Amino acid sequence: MSPAPVPLPASTDAPLLRLRGLYSQRLAPVSLDLAAGECAAVVGASGSGKSLLLRQIADLDPGHGEAELDGRRRSAMRGFEWRRRVVYCQAEAGWWDDHVSAHYTDRAAALDIMGRLGLAESKLDALVHELSTGERQRMGLARALLQAPRVLLLDEPTAALDKAATGLVEQELMRVLATGAAILLVTHSAEQAARLARRTWRMEHGHLEPLWT
């Protein structure tokens, strides 16, 4: 049974994230605003530059241009400080320890999020290799959410999930938006973009073009 649709929260007019001419060797200049409580989506073929854009915003790759969070320039912040507030969640999370629990400093908070994502408590005490691809994907999202990001950059967050698990993830993302955070979502699913996003762009060969508003 499909989960009941979650109403989109109201966003404010004030820009939370501002990008001004952000570009790299493989990414044409991008300028856009995201408001608090807003989700926007980027669709496009594999290799078109969607992930490159997220990595540029997160300041993970060399590039040019300016980004601002709450009116504060990224160039005036240390990299780790920016990335604590603008959190990039890649399709396959990185794991630096064999034990899942080593990646979570607040067990109670982790379990709370895991429960909403349909993950059993035992998964927190498992070894990373014991998790399925979909479980690792949801655990990576839980890890990102524990940082309480102001902006969440999501790269195909439900690519490995079935319909039921996808519904739980989307409900959790709506919860995040309701707190006033913003989400930039990369997805291959036009249906998911329509459910979650107020604005959608298409990425083609490193160029970002509006798809609908």
Image (spheres, grey):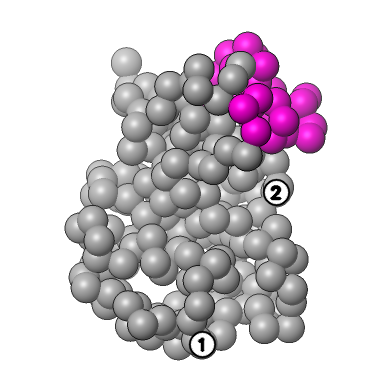
Residue at the image position 36 percent from the left and 29 percent from the top: 161
Task: Identify the residue at image location x=63%, y=39%.
Answer: 96
Residue 111 included in the magenta stretch of the image:
yes
**Can residue 127 be seen in the rendering of this structure?**
yes
Question: Looking at the picture, how far across and down is residue 183, in whole percent?
Answer: 51, 56
Residue 123 belongs to the span the image colors magenta: yes
Where disc 2 sits, the SS reads: loop
Q: Name the residue located 32 percent from the left edge and 50 percent from the top edge.
A: 187
Q: Which residue is mark 1?
A: 65
Residue at image x 39%, y 67%?
52
Numbered disc 1: secondary structure: strand
Q: What is the x, y in percent for residue 141?
A: 55, 39
Q: Quadrant of residue 166?
A: top left
| Residue 194 locus on image (x, y percent) | 30, 50
Q: Is residue 127 above or below residue 7?
A: above
What residue span does the magenta drawing correspond to?
97-125
Q: Relative to residue 2, is residue 132 drawn left or right?
A: right
Q: Which mark is residue 206?
A: none
